[in-house]
Amino acid sequence: MEIRRELAAASTMNCFHLEDFIAGWIGGASSVIVGHPLDTVKTRLQAGKGYQNTLHCVLTIYRKETVSGFFKGLSFPLASITVYNSVVFGLFSNTQRLISKIRHGDSRHPCGMLDLLLASMLTGLVSVSLGAPVDLVKIRLQMQTRPVLAENLNLAGNTSSNIPLKSVEISGQHGYRGPLHCISSILQSEGLQGLYRGAGAMVLRDVPGYTLYFLPYTLFCDLLNPDGKSSPRFSSIWLAGGLAGSISWVTATPADVVKSRMQADSLHPRKYRGILHCIVHSYKTEGLQVFFRGATVNAIRGFPMSATMFLGYELSLKFFRSL
């Protein structure tokens, strides 16, 4: 009996590969650097005000904040989203092997579409526990500068003031000095649950989002490598990863809008009482099109980010397995 237990434990350990997590970390770091500028634009479009369209948002950020405005909050994602992607890719790959071991008795058995679907959904669900605080802090830092109506500051319309009736920029009302100060401020004012604001909307985004991320990638890789005898070429990985990223981000945009709005809402009392209230309020005040705000940016940024992510992951994995 004891020998059987040891064999079962060894078999389970064979399903766990540490290199998947390391490769995911490397791919994640590459994708963050490539995609952060457009991620800032996406966040401003979804949770900010005063932007007419994507191009107007880009030009406004550049004119008022220069190039550095696009990289606001980069240090935190670079340190944290790399770990997040490490967990996502490591979890997805190891979950596939575990499912293959349970269903087919061999962790090396190729996964079918149903296995990939289950692994993707589980990855999306578990990733929220780490991803929700990361996204919250990133968005709060990205929204540090907000357009505020001058008349709300009792400046416009005053005969003694020379300030015109237009939007002016002031620094974020919280004045976060950095990621650690942001986390500390949220914990002091909102408690631990404050770091998970918008987590429910993130589940609605990431469970189907990762399904439409990993499945298309696998399908496109198979289409671009029809013989299946050799590993996909790097160009195939890059193209498959980019297309999968665009598909995933575009379809996830409505839930992403709700998540971004709830996480950017740092007012007291809250503007949004919950997911349903955020959806209803956004629809009533801005119409159905509000849920597709940032979809163009998501489609554009999703391609290079995911192409870089998958290529960095696959190249790193190939290197580690050759050692």
Image (cartoon, rainbow, N blue to C red):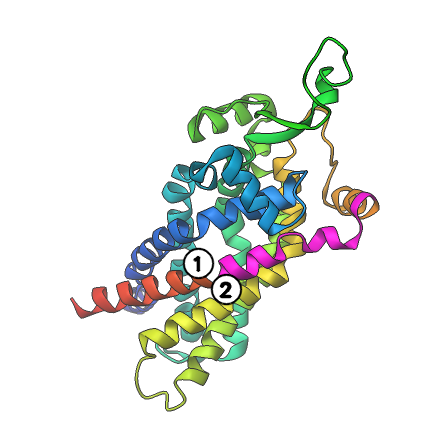
**Mark 1 touches mark 2? (CB < 8 Å):** yes
Residue 170 higher or lower than 30, as above or below? above
For this view, does 184 lie left or right of residue 45? left
Other-residue count near label 2 (Cα within 10 Å), few / some / many at <14 / 14–19 / ≥20: many
| Residue ranking furthest to the right | 284
**Vertical order, 185 against 225 (above or below):** above
Mark seen at residue 199: none
- Amino acid under disc 2: Gly
User: Taking 55 as reference, is 175 above or below it?
Assistant: above
Closer to the chain start, of discs 1 and 2, is: 2
Q: Main secondary structure of the magenta part?
A: helix
Q: Position of residue 211 (x, y in %)?
A: 55, 66
Q: CA distance from mark 1 to mark 2?
A: 7 Å
**Residue at 25% over, 69% down:** 318
Query: In the drawing, does residue 73 fall left or right of residue 235?
Result: right
Q: Residue furthest bottom?
A: 227
Residue bounds of the magenta highlight: 285-302
Could you say where residue 41 lies in the image, as x and y percent from the top left?
55, 46
Q: In this orientation, which residue lies closer to the viewer: 211 or 3?
A: 211
Q: Residue at x 28, y 66 (%)?
A: 315
- In the picture of the structure, the residue carrying the numbered disc 2 is 245
Instruction: Give the residue number, with chain letter if any, for mark 1.
Output: 305
Disc 1 on helix, strand or loop? Answer: helix
